[in-house]
């Protein structure tokens, strides 16, 4: 059925008739105007800033408008070391963003604690508290890597079906859009991770988009 | 630029200027040869003021305060002792026996101050203060009233090593949050078990 429709569309377009679906228009619009939050945490943020400048020009992907308020942002690029003292604020910022919202964890620090993972003060990956869409390894990842992550995210947005059980979180009323903010405990953050979100803890493999 | 007097000379100056103060020169064997002066708690404030106001030294800038943790150590030594030992015939005889003896050297916490002179352009003079032990006697006199620049760094040493600076105007944790109870830079600090490499599910 899907395949038939696709072929029909191609056939029609060959004859000068343009057809589309609401889903396609909706996702096309969303993926080309992802507005990131103006937000950087450590050295990786410098690479993120470079990505937005003329040489790498993130504006080509419709993401040049870094919003200084979470209320206007669609994407949070966690670029840098998340200290335990900062982690609750990162989760809070994410909670304040309206759906649909996405997360890129940029750099070794944001995905696992990186060079500081044995330290007493660094969170071992922001995916413990918020759902991360794209992980970028590297210390720091080059702007090309961030652009690649961005294109990966665009692909992900483009592939989201608006109906069916797989539809994105913002179209499922019973799924949460806010996540518990960890509290400062006597020895570290409490809880140490949110088991609902933290895939590694559930033994789930991460979905790889190629 | 005036050459800085040697630690021994500074010690003599202090002992002349602050009656009763005990100063020990702690030699540094490394190539840097930055010898330091260990002060006693009671006179530390007076010595600090003396160093700051002395016409020749004028150590008006404290560039660094840091903590050092010296954990309890245990040394084992073999000692020969004379003892009464029962011989094969049942008669006790005095014999030399080797025994291993363990001596516990209690650890302490240390605060280190680096002083410079802006006017005289010399330094550093390194001061040390040692606590009585690592558990209940972790108090030191604060030198913040003498050098304001020590305020945040003494707070840091309090936060990370648990050194309590008496006389500090605002002794609170500075890097960790208020409810935190550990002292993470102490050598026996155990971080919380939150590593997935330990607790995670193996693929
Ligand atoms: S991953 Fe490397 S470059 Fe990025 S924030 Fe961490 S230490 Fe800095």
Image (spheres, coloured by chain):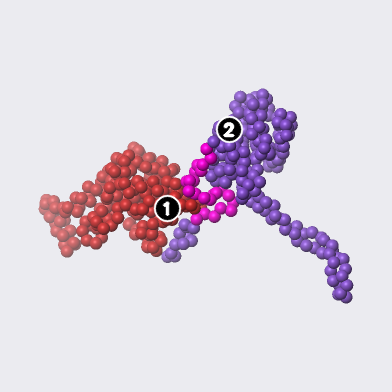
Chain colours: A red, B purple
Label 2: which secondary element: loop
State which quarter of the image contains the N terminus of chain A: bottom left
Going by the image, does A13 lie left or right of B165? left
- Whether residue B83 is visible, yes or no, is yes
State which quarter of the image contains the C terminus of chain A: bottom left
Going by the image, does A207 lie left or right of B16? left
| Percent x, y of residue A98 | 28, 47
Q: Provide the residue designation for mark 2.
A: B145
Label 2 CB-ligand 1 distance < 8 A: no
- Whether residue A145 is visible, yes or no, is no
- Residue at 56% in and 43% down: B158
- Which residue range is magenta in the image? B170-192
| Percent x, y of residue B13 | 72, 30
In the image, is residue B177 part of the stretch drawn in magenta? yes
Going by the image, does B107 lie left or right of A13? right
Check the residue under mark 2 and report the chain it is in. Answer: B
Q: Provide the residue designation for mark 1.
A: A125
| Percent x, y of residue B79 | 79, 59
Check the residue under mark 1 and report the chain it is in. Answer: A
Instruction: Measure how far apart labels 1 and 2 are at the Cα level.
Output: 42 Å
């Amino acid at each position: 059925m899907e395949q038939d429709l696709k072929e029909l569309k191609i056939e029609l377009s060959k004859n000068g008739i343009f057809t589309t679906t609401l889903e396609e228009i909706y996702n096309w619009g969303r993926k080309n105007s992802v507005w990131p939050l103006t937000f950087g945490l450590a050295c990786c943020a410098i690479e993120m800033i470079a990505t937005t400048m003329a040489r790498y020009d993130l504006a080509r992907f419709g993401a040049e408008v870094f919003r200084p308020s979470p209320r206007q942002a669609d994407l949070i690029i966690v670029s840098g070391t998340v200290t335990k003292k900062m982690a609750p604020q990162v989760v809070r910022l994410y909670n304040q963003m309206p759906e649909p919202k996405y997360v890129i964890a940029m750099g070794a620090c944001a995905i696992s604690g990186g060079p500081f993972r044995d330290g007493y003060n660094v969170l071992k990956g922001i995916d413990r508290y918020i759902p991360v869409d794209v992980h970028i390894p590297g210390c720091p990842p080059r702007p090309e890597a961030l652009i690649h992550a961005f294109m990966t995210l665009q692909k992900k947005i483009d592939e989201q079906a608006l109906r069916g059980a797989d539809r994105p979180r913002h179209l499922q009323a019973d799924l949460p859009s806010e996540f518990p903010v960890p509290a400062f405990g006597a020895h570290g953050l409490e809880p140490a991770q949110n088991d609902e979100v933290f895939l590694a803890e559930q033994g789930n493999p991460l979905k790889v988009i190629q | 630029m005036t050459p800085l007097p040697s630690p021994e000379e500074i010690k003599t100056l202090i002992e002349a200027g602050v009656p009763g103060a005990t100063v020990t020169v702690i030699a540094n064997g490394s190539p840097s040869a930055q010898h330091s002066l260990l002060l006693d708690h009671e006179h530390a404030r007076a010595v600090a003021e003396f160093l700051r106001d002395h016409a020749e030294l004028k150590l008006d800038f404290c560039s660094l305060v840091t903590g050092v943790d010296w954990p309890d150590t245990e040394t084992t030594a073999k000692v020969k002792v004379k003892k009464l030992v029962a011989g094969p015939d049942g008669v006790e005889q005095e014999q030399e026996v080797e025994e291993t003896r363990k001596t516990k050297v209690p650890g302490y916490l240390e605060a280190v101050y680096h002083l410079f002179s802006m006017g005289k352009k010399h330094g550093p003079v390194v001061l040390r203060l040692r606590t009585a032990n690592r558990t209940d006697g972790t108090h030191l006199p604060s030198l913040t009233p003498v050098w304001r620049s020590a305020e945040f760094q003494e707070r840091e040493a309090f936060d990370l090593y648990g050194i309590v600076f008496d006389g500090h105007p605002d002794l609170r944790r500075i890097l960790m949050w208020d409810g935190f109870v550990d002292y993470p830079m102490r050598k026996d600090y155990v971080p919380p078990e939150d590593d997935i490499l330990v607790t995670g599910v193996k693929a």
